Amino acid sequence: MKRERRQELRTNELAASLVEAREFFNKHGTYILAGLVVVALLFAVTAYVSHQRRVTAANEWAQLDKLRSEVQDPAQLTKALDSLEGLAADAENADVAQEALLQRGRSAEFEALKDAAGPNVALLDQAKESYQAVLDRFGKESMLAAGSALIRLANLEANYFAADFDPAHRQTARTYLERLRDDSRFDGTPFETEALARLNKLDETFVAVRIVEAPPPTPIPAGPPAPIPDPLAPPMPPLPDEALWTPTEPSSPADPDQETPAEPDPTADEPGADEPPADGVADDEPQPLPSTQPAVP
């Protein structure tokens, strides 16, 4: 009995809850449905915006890579530098804008130093403008951007000094390097190490070195032209000292001009074995040795 009563109570409570829920949805269902639609729309818009940002960033990086290739061509340098400046101004991605400005500064500075007559000041001005823009736009938020810009600005002052030998550039470079040294954000970083090293060698860097052209070489007076050897001329006879050691080849027996010695006649009379020689001494007898004693009178 009690079990049936409890089951009946549960059934009544469930039915009452369903009735309340239906009444609640009948009263507020429109607002609930509108809220769900709004949440779904917000999620879709957020996903779309995030996707578009990724696509835009990818396109901007691709454009930056293309400009990096074009800036290597001297014929497209001016146009590429202007395009880098425009990309830095219009880019939605802050990293792309920062890298575009740094690339513009590096390319202009590198091209300015190619002139054999001295650094191109106009290109150095464009590089300085780009580095200063990096420092102003991103220096407070990014330590890397600030350090890179200050190092490049200090290096530019040395290039300016090489163009006009103005000692004011040394003090300007010192100011940039001291900012790196004194900023606590750069403590223990390579930027601080580089700044200290350049400050120690600042006086050695800013030394005016003027290249004086060498005087023209003394012309050599023109003399008579050297004789041209005749390839058909007979060879020259050997020098006297060469005749002493230069071997000579024996003449050929067939040479008619050379006399051949006469051969002995086998039928000629020869002295007999028992006949002494003409001088009266036989060849096989021992000859007396000459006396070494003085003759006795």
Image: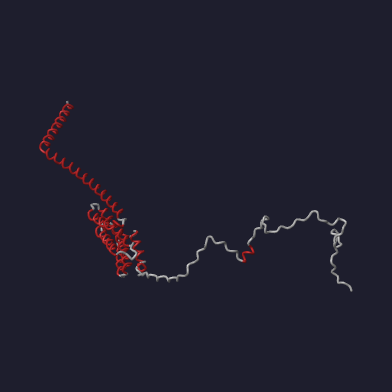
Q: Picture quarter containing residue 143?
A: bottom left
x then y, percent, for residue 131:
28, 60
The foreground one among 242 and 160 is 242
In the current view of this chain or complex, which residue is farthest to the left? 27
Q: Relative to 145, say whether 4 is above or below.
A: above
x then y, percent, for residue 238:
60, 64
In the current view of this chain or complex, which residue is farthest to the bottom? 297
Say which quadrant the C terminus sits in: bottom right
x then y, percent, for residue 262:
74, 57
In the rendered structure, the answer to whether residue 230 lies left or right of residue 257 reads left
- Which residue does the image show at 87% across and 58% down from the upper left? 275
The foreground one among 121 and 57 is 121
Numbered label tally? 0
In the rendered structure, the answer to whether residue 201 lies left or right of residue 295 reads left
Say which quadrant the N terminus sits in: top left
Q: Picture quarter containing residue 75?
A: bottom left
Q: Relative to 98, say whether 291 is above or below.
A: below
x then y, percent, for residue 207:
35, 69
In the current view of this chain or complex, which residue is farthest to the front? 256
In the current view of this chain or complex, which residue is farthest to the right? 297
Which color scheme is applied? secondary structure
The foreground one among 157 and 182 is 157
Q: Picture quarter containing residue 85?
A: bottom left
In the rendered structure, the answer to whether residue 182 lies left or right of residue 36 reads right
From this viewpoint, is residue 181 visible? Answer: no
From this viewpoint, is residue 254 visible? Answer: yes
